[in-house]
Image: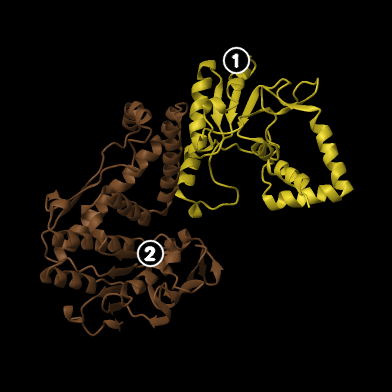
Chain colours: A brown, B yellow
Amino acid sequence: MRIKNISLRNFRKFTEISFDLSTRVVILGPNGSGKTTLAEAGALVLGGRSFRTADLKECIREGAPYAFVKAVLLLDDITENAVTVGMDRKGQRKILRDERSVTRRSLVAAHPFVVCTQEDIDMVAGSPKRRRDFLDKIAMGHDRDYIDILTPYLRFVKQKSALLKSGRSGGLTHLNEAAVPLIGEIRRRRRMAADAVTARFAGVADRASVDIAAEIRLPSETDDGEIRARLRERAAREKERGCLLYGPHLDEVHLSLKGRAARLSSSGEIAFGAFCLRIAEASLLQDGGWPPVFIADEIFSFMDAERRAKAWSLLDELPIQTISTFHREKEHRWGSAVQMIKL
Amino acid sequence: MDHGIIRQLVRSLRALPGVNQRQAERIAFTLLQDRTARAALDEIVSTLSLTDPCPRCGWFIEREQPCANCGGEHSVICVVENFSDLLGIERTGQFAGSYHLLGGLIAPLEGTLPEDLNAEPLRERVEAGGIAEVILALPATIEGEATIHYLHELLAPTGVTLTRIARGIPSGSKVEYLDRKTVGNAIAERVKVSSGLSE
């Protein structure tokens, strides 16, 4: 799948701009020229959400009442989808596919993509939440039904949290019991996702001739009996503190690079590790159906010249559409197949 | 111009489920101007004055009369969350027993805990004897599952047979298009095929 063309109206700094896109797009420009905005617009038409803000009002150009991004997506050689994502000052978002209103969920299901940004450094070296989200996205790419396990689990978290905050205790055992099978299943799916990612990661590192083996460790309790026992153990402290202390939404996800905790690695190694994780994600998504679009926003800033060259060669050999933003023009030997957009 | 009466009417109408501000205003104006609508409301009020909620099953009883739902001889009780679910089962024509309305599910976000449910009277109904089976017709949500677990714990000492409605493939659906969870539930809760041939 790829984005054939894209138009932006009143989107951030652009009043009106449009481009036809090839399979290898490089966006070049100085700070503030709108490189990230174009990458953001690409992700918006594929997934209905911005990777820079949760509040789409921020994307509307100052003084304009609304904004939209329009694109023609080429699913295969002959099938096209016209997608429009619009937003207004009330914070309302409208997604149209072939002039019909669709949900964000159905958009994501039909148009796989991977976004790689400098924020991914947090995914490697920051708190476990980013790593849990990453594994959940991989698990979702493998099996869309995973959402039917995650959604009721998150509902459980809200219900249990309300109960613990209320200071009342009736119903705690029953809510816990209802969540037991969900907890086991989420952990099993994340384990599968972690195994798949680390195997692909090894292949990516091998291709780049980089010694950077990754390992992901997760809680091992997946058995109903064990989970039940842990929930029972924590119940008294949870009541005392008025908050949840156990469950997949709090699980530690340890990532190690070259056998030691990733957060202890150098910033160049962390940035390269994050990039390789995203390449592994793209490779897994490709197995699941249509080839994803890979959007990379200024990811080379923390890498030295050698790692930058290796990362570019990995990006360049991806058999899918890539849209990358760069600050400097003379950074790489781009090759003749690259479409340059200079801002 | 004083709108005190209209404000009072709108406030009262807003207390009804499913009535928003705009709808409440429309109903209020209709009741003030339309004699037929006002006569219909009078009839509703006089009918309601003859009834009370049944303290046992959550249905309603007419004054001096036994409850039309739990007053008779029934060996099977179907437990539902609310009146709408009861109507859903009634429309199938497949159930001839008595109902028990819980009045909610365990949902702390909505302020509903086990002690807020109409569950103790259910245990009393079962303990009173003559009940062979209790069917739990509750939703397959986290709140429904928590409530099922609670009722299971509550009714286990009575020894009554406790069942839950099956979760499976909707009529007219093809297996290949359904999600894994639905198909998995349908397999787990499969039923024996009867020949369908007349003896």
Q: Is residue A71 visible?
A: no
Q: On what subunit does the disc labeled 2 rest?
A: A
Does B151 appear above or below A33?
A: above
Outermost bottom residue: A336
Where is residue A176, by image quadrant? top left
Task: Identify the residue at image location x=84%, y=33%.
Answer: B46
Q: Is residue B50 visible?
A: yes
Task: Identify the residue at image location x=56%, y=68%.
Answer: A100
Amino acid type of the residue tagged 2 in the rendering:
Pro
Give whichever of A275, B92 is nearer the camera: A275
Give whichever of A262, B2 is nearer the camera: B2
Residue for badge 1: B127
Does A75 appear above or below A132?
A: below
Outermost top residue: B128
Give whichever of B177, B134 is nearer the camera: B134
On the image, the x and y values in percent for residue A153 come to: 42, 42
On the image, the x and y values in percent for residue A338 come to: 26, 81
Residue for badge 2: A112
On the image, the x and y values in percent for residue A92 come to: 51, 63
Same chain check for tags 1 and 2 = no
Label drawn at residue A301:
none
Secondary structure under tag 2 reads: loop
Secondary structure under tag 1 reads: helix
In the image, B20: left or right of A341? right
Give whichever of A119, A173 is nearer the camera: A119
Quadrant where the C terminus of chain B lies? top right
User: Label 1: how many residues lie within 10 Å, few (<14), some (14-19) or many (20+)?
Assistant: some
Amino acid type of the residue tagged 1 in the rendering:
Glu
